[in-house]
Every structure is written in C-alpha cells, then in structure tokens.
Amino acid sequence: MVYDVIIIGGGPAGFTAALYSARANLKTLLLERMFSGGQMATTEVMENYPGFEDPINGIDLAMRMENQAKKFGAEVIYDEVMELELKEKIKTVTTRQTVYKTKSVILAMGGSSRRLGIDQENRLMGRGVSYCATCDGSFYRDMEVAVIGGGDTAVEDANYLSRMCKKVYLVHRRDSLRAVKSLQDEVFRNPKVEIIWDSVVEDIEGKDAVEALKLRNVRTGESSRINIEGVFVAIGINPNTKLVQGVVELSESGHIITDENMNTNIPRVMACGDIREKNLRQVVTAAADGAIAAYSAERQVDSCDC
C-alpha cells in the first residue's frame, strides 16, 4: 500500500497536518516515536491558544488534536522513524517495525530540550536534573529547586514549581527576562521565586543526586553556590533534524528551510512547526504551519504522476 502522505511527528503541527490531510481524503499516516503533543505536552497551562477562555493543559489539547485527526480517518502509529528516502517519486519511510511507501512526506519532528553542556548533567539526569517541570515537578514537593533560563518556558516552569516546592531559584544569564510581560509580572509577584540575575551554571554538585549548583556571575566573575535538590533546564530547543541532515536544506541553526507553503528543496516533502526556520515558535503557529503543509501536500499529490 502507498500512502498519499506520511507525517512524521505528533505535535500540534503534525496533528493539524493529519487533520487537514484526512479531511481532504488523502490516505494519511502519522508516525510519532514517543507521545502525543511534543513540547506542547510538557506545558501545564496554556492561556494563549485561541478558543479557550480558560487555560488548557498541553496534554489535554494534544489528545483533542489526536482524536480529531483520527475522527476524519488519519491513521496514527507510535513507532520511531529510522531512515528516510525522499528523492524518488515514491518516498520510503523506514521505522523500527515496518517500511512504508508514500507519495509525500510532511516533516514535523519538532525539537528537543537544549542541554547545559556540563559534565555532571548527563550523570545526574533523572536524579535531580530534568527538562520537564510538568513531568517531574511533583517529585520535588516541599523541596528547593532551580530553573535555568529566562524565556517563556523557564518563567512558566518557575511559577508552576512554586505551587509545590518550598522555594524556586530562577537563574538567568542576563539582567532582564525574555518572557512575555504577563509571565514576568506573575513571577515578580511570586514570593516563592528568587531570581538570580547575570549568572550561569558552572557545575552541578551531587554524588547520587543533585545537591547544589555552582554559579558564576558573568559581570563580576564571582562564584556562588546554592543548595537545591532539583534543577530544571529551560534554555531553548534544538531542532530534531538528524534524520534529514544532508538531505533537505537546513539553516545555520539547523532548522529546515521552507517557502511560505512549507515546501522544502525536495518535491513533495514539506516541513512544519518548530523544526522549520521561522521567527515565532508557538502552538498556534505550529498548527498554522501544519494546515499549510497539508494543503501543499494535497495539491502536489493530486498533480503527481507517481
């Protein structure tokens, strides 16, 4: 069997693409290696997705998107894609379990949390080092923790963790936050959050679990130490483009370059969501990308002689 479109990645971009493809009567398969929602599923509270007057949980929104895509006939399989052959008219997608054939491919693999790059980070991962506050926050109830970063995710994480933790340190390398104003206002009012400005992590201390952070002030060069039991890293996202390196055109930052219709440099291969080069990476822009990618796939599949 040859699919009309295979979508790789089950975040908001991928599931929106699946919804639009299925509604266009394209034989649609979505492949996701882990869980529905991607980065969105790690967000506890979403206040800026249109249509929800009250905040919605990222996991809840992900499940709604998945169910809606399935309702219109999209097939969803949880399996990891290992190899892609994209240059032929009929594309080949090889997973751990199966080999699939398709007329078009939509790349929606999103991104993965950026690491600090400290030796102790890998050793203590899962033993105090985390990249998902909503996943692991409950393990640190009544403890003192630190969040590293100054963007939306870091500030959201700090506010979220303050509900269960005794104290939250927010460590940022600059003297001002990059998060939107509403999130900044909330964290500034939060008595359980202490912001440590102009500082970077030099080391994570602990034998069997995280015990402390060693910090360095980037302005003065002075070192300091804070005792904590958990550290949540929220310093950005790296695009998951390993599968297509050397195949599709990438930007200097490693994101996939597309035109306004989500087309890559390979015919009938589209990319959408956080994986592509663009200025704003939000759930609503990922969903918009997915809809456009599916529209492009429909037009190209209809005119394809494959």
Image (cartoon, rainbow, N blue to C red):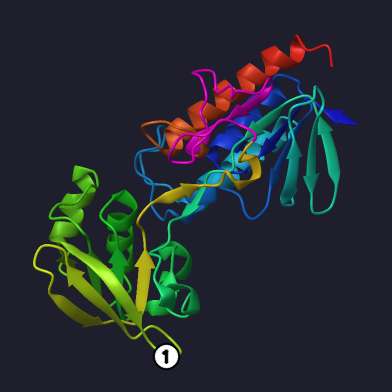
Q: Residue at x 46, y 70 (%)?
A: 136
Looking at the picture, which amino acid does disc 1 mark? Lys
Quickly name the residue at label 1. 207
* Residue 99 higher or lower than 297, as above or below: below
Expressed as whole percent of the image width and height from the top left, the position of residue 241 reads 57, 43
What range of the chain is rendered magenta? 247-274
Q: Residue at x 72, y 48 (%)?
A: 81
Image-quadrant location for residue 25: top right
Does the segment drawn in magenta span residue 142? no
Specify the farthest residue to the bottom: 207
Expressed as whole percent of the image width and height from the top left, the position of residue 122 reads 48, 73
Does the segment drawn in magenta span residue 254? yes
| Image quadrant where one finds the C terminus | top right
* Residue 167 higher or lower than 290, as above or below: below
Local packing at callout 1 (Cα closer than 10 Å; few below 14, some 14-19, many 20+) is: few
Q: Is residue 249 left or right of residue 138?
A: right
* Residue 202 higher or lower than 57, as above or below: below
Image-quadrant location for residue 29: top right
Camera-side residue of 164 and 175? 175
Instruction: State whether the magenta stretch is mostly helix, strand or loop.
Output: loop
Expressed as whole percent of the image width and height from the top left, the position of residue 286 reads 48, 34
Q: Residue at x 66, y 23 (%)?
A: 266
* Residue 227 higher or lower than 133, as above or below: below
